[in-house]
Image (tube, grey):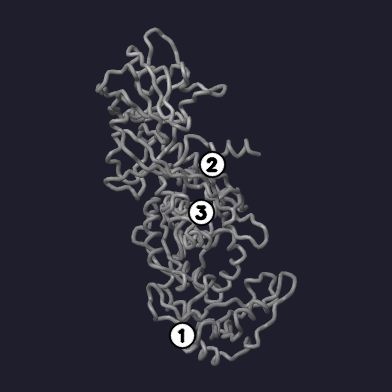
Amino acid sequence: MTTPTDSASPSNFVRDIIIDDLKTNKYAGRVHTRFPPEPNGYLHIGHAKSINLNFGLAAEFGGKCNLRFDDTNPEKEETEYVDSILEDLRWLGADFEDRVFYASDYFAQLSEWAVQLIQAGKAYVCDLSAEDVRRQRGTLTEPGQESPYRNRTVDENLALFERMKAGEFPDGARTLRAKIDMASPNLNLRDPIVYRILNAEHHRTGNKWHIYPMYDFAHGESDSIEGITHSICTLEFEDHRPLYDWYIDQLGIYHPQQIEFDRLNLTYTLLSKRKLLTLVKEKHVSGWDDPRMPTICGIRRRGYTSEAIRSFCRRVGVSKTNGTTELSLLEYFVREDLNRRATRVMAVLRPLKLVIDNYPEGQVEEMDAVNNPEDANAGSRKVPFSKVLYIEQDDFREDPPKQYFRLTPGREVRLRYGYFVTCTGVVKDDNGNVVEVHCTYDPATHGGDAPDGRKVKSTIHWVSADHAIDAEVRLYQHLFTVENPNDVAEGQDFTVNLNPHSLEVLAAKVEPSLREAPVLSRYQFERLGYFCVDTDAAADKLVFNRTVALRDTWAKIEKKSK
């Protein structure tokens, strides 16, 4: 394997460690990482950072990255979650080839190693309840108390452990604990639980097992079995590393290197699977794939691209200090990516009828419209133009404020790809609301330019009323109203910070080129933002999600309100 130079990629301390290990031939030139999700929920954008790091480093150094499901808690795990994780990883471009493993693959070996610890006098069966174990654990300033069952004989512990495996005891009746040091300054070393009794059906092993290993025991040993060189975890596991080392040292097995990095935190976003599950169960959202959710399936449905997510992850990098990243940075990378790839189309979200009085009755022209000015190969399309159009309600004001340059009585504006038009009057309903705007057009300005050189200050978009397609458009704001959704008063639940206006549904009009737009295809609605065809769309129903606005309007609104 060729060792890359330090300047081959944007560096970080994890990458630097791997480069040094390759230089010293620490693992015989191997780089083998893993991504170990728990199948107890759907992956979210925080996992994308870990995925990008683990699979990216393996790819850069010609190594391998395993996918290993940490399925050690049958009460919370489901095949649905396994399937969703596989789908999300493939969409993100993670290449695990045929290396899909499960901690449950190793249950027999883990059980044998537990017996080895018992035989060495390093583990014992404890009858204390979970509450008593916590109570006797001690504090950061006071040592813990030894269990009254700590000095059981090896034979007694072996016999009890076998009975635990055989399912003779109810849930929580006994645990297997490591015998380390109840006075250790690291609370994780105060006789931690190795196995607990759970008489629950496992999604892969069924009812074969009545005991299940704790994560701290299964984690390092699974890495060892798979020959992982660099076991990359988030910072909350740093204090657990001495325990992983202790287990591996006591068992005398191959020792991977654990490295901790900062987890991703985003403003206005929750990245807790437990709390995301609460949102789903309590129906605050429509499901795990609700486009307001930070789940991979949710942001995919909203229209984010995997390329944008990978670019974002590279930009935020990794460090040894936890911090919070602005959600607007993620949206920036989504905009940058979609600006290059999204076809431009015209859509009117809040339609207002515009009638061109001097345009010939029944005439239809086809205007040339550019598909993507950022892509010379994207070509153009034909957009029908007729006497009656729809424009945005916001593009007309009967009594305009200062610096308003769009359509008003007596003012001339340009219709995108069309003509100059001048407002001559309006029609109002019984409540005084403008329901129809009347204009005249200048035939000499076909294509949007005036031969006499006169200029207008505004160009507005439109769709032909006779040719427009009805579409449901869903506009999204942040799911939470505060930057830190966990910031609540004592006794309050995080759901108090939910944004009641996070979803607005509009009856829109879109140009006819979108009639057969495929699900999850992405577009830029000119002047309005980037949109994606939702999975709810059907042959007789177009549904679009707004992926992201053309610019960070939310941030500007927030600043003005403070």
Q: What element does badge 3 sit on?
A: helix
Numbered mark located on residue 46 in the image: 3
Residue type indicated by callout 1: Lys
- Judging by the rendered image, the residue that carries numbered circle 1 is 165
For the point 40% across and 53% down, the residue is 94
**Screen quadrant of the C terminus:** top right
Mark 2 to mark 1 CA distance (whole Å)? 51 Å
Residue type indicated by callout 2: Ser
Front label number (2 vs 3): 2
Single out the residue that lies furthest toward the top.
Answer: 452
Residue type indicated by callout 3: Gly
Mark 3 to mark 1 CA distance (whole Å)? 36 Å
Mark 2 to mark 3 CA distance (whole Å)? 15 Å
Numbered mark located on residue 328 in the image: 2
Q: How many marks?
A: 3
In which image quadrant can residue 89 be found? bottom left
Task: Give the x, y percent position of residue 431.
Answer: 47, 33
